[in-house]
């Protein structure tokens, strides 16, 4: 994997790495000895990193991945439960902190890609499903084991899963709690692409490059529109979508796109 560049960000914990390699902002779960289980300190660090990526014009897309190649993320770090979730007060803090981290990924205003290699289980799969695209290796494994552990799976996670795979597949995943392979994940719509392990990084970089070369305002408007479609009608902000679409037509990028098309050259978009 590419090493962090001088533009690396200090997340505040060695278990979450972040750096900018235009057009990509990399966010890496760095807990390989525990299959990249996500600890409380990692959840706490995510919002600031995503905020930095959102406000950096060099970043067109964020890629989330796990260190070590054996797992994207295997869910919550159960070894912390005694100290971080051992009381009602501690558990409330955990829920608040982890919820803020998850929300920062889901509401990130730019495209995001989950780069999945190996296990993507439980909360790790929930994180991947919060990204816009998911590209995985052929040997990746997926699952939500809540029913085998006696855990309740909150509505927000079920809603997101069902929007992506449909109600029937969501029930299959949750009822059976089975671990399924990349072929099943592709069939159910859990992932967008399944590629050989050696092709994973190149494929993700290719997707990020395609996104980065497109008009940022158009991409933003498209993301807002699709996200509105998957939001409860009572909470949809169609006005924000309409304004984003209008901003495209009022932009210099729209002029550049038309001229580039007529001149048969590649457009150079500026996001304004």
Image: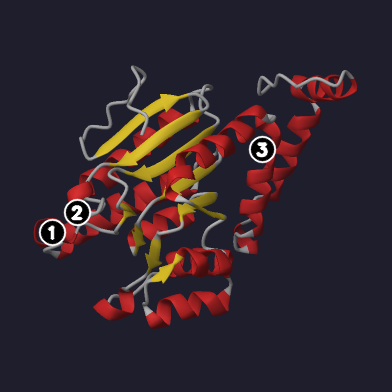
Q: Report the Cα–Cα distance between label 2 and label 3.
A: 36 Å
As helix, strand or loop, the secondary structure at mark 1 comes to: helix
**Vertical relation: 65 (above or below) 11:** below
As helix, strand or loop, the secondary structure at mark 2 comes to: helix
Left or right: 191 as drawn, with respect to 157: right
Residue occupying image coordinates x 62% and y 35%:
211
Report which residue position mark 1 lands on.
79
Quadrant position of residue 239: top right
Q: Quadrant of the C terminus?
A: top right
Q: Is the image coloured rainbow, by chain, by secondary structure, or in one colour? A: secondary structure
Q: Position of residue 50 (x, y in %)?
A: 41, 36
Q: Nearer the viewer, residue 209 or 257?
A: 209
Verify CB contact (< 8 Å) between mark 2 and mark 3: no
Q: Position of residue 225 (x, y in %)?
A: 68, 49
Left or right: 109 as drawn, with respect to 48: right
Q: Residue 133 got which mark?
A: none
Q: Quadrant of the N terminus?
A: top left
Q: Report the Cα–Cα distance between label 1 and label 3.
A: 40 Å
Foreground mark, 2 or 3, reads 2
Verify CB contact (< 8 Å) between mark 1 and mark 3: no
Report which residue position mark 3 lands on.
219
Dot 1 or dot 3: first in sequence order is 1
Left or right: 68 as drawn, with respect to 159: left
Verify CB contact (< 8 Å) between mark 2 and mark 1: yes
Report which residue position mark 2 lands on.
34
Residue occupying image coordinates x 65% and y 30%:
216
Q: Position of residue 84 (x, y in %)?
A: 14, 56
Residue occupying image coordinates x 16% and y 59%:
89
As helix, strand or loop, the secondary structure at mark 3 comes to: helix
Q: Report the Cα–Cα distance between label 2 and label 1.
A: 9 Å
Residue 2 appears in the picture as rendered = yes
Give the class, few, some or many, for how many residues have Cα within 10 Å of label 1's Cα (few <14, many ≥20): few
């Amino acid at each position: 994997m590419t090493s962090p560049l001088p533009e690396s960000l200090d997340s505040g914990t060695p278990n979450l790495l972040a750096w900018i390699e235009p057009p990509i902002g990399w966010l890496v779960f760095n807990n390989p000895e525990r299959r990249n289980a996500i600890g409380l300190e990692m959840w706490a660090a995510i919002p600031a990193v995503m905020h930095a990526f959102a406000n950096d014009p060099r970043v067109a897309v964020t890629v989330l991945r796990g260190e070590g190649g054996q797992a994207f993320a295997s869910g919550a770090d159960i070894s912390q439960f005694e100290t971080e979730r051992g009381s009602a007060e501690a558990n409330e803090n955990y829920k608040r902190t982890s919820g803020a981290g998850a929300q920062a990924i889901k509401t990130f205003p730019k495209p995001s890609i989950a780069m999945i290699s190996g296990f993507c289980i439980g909360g790790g799969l929930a994180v991947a499903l919060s990204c816009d695209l998911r590209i995985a290796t052929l040997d990746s494994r997926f699952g939500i084991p809540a029913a085998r552990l006696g855990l309740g799976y909150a509505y927000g996670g079920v809603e997101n899963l069902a929007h992506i795979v449909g109600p029937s597949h969501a029930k299959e995943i949750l009822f059976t709690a089975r671990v399924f392979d990349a072929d099943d994940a592709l069939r159910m719509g859990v992932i967008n692409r399944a590629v050989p392990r050696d092709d994973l990084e190149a494929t993700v970089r290719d997707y990020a490059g395609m996104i980065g070369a497109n008009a940022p305002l158009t991409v933003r408007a498209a993301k807002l529109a699709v996200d509105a479609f998957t939001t409860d009608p009572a909470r949809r902000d169609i006005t924000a979508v309409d304004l984003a679409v209008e901003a495209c037509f009022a932009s210099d990028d729209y002029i550049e796109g038309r001229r580039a098309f007529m001149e048969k050259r590649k457009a150079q978009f500026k996001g304004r």
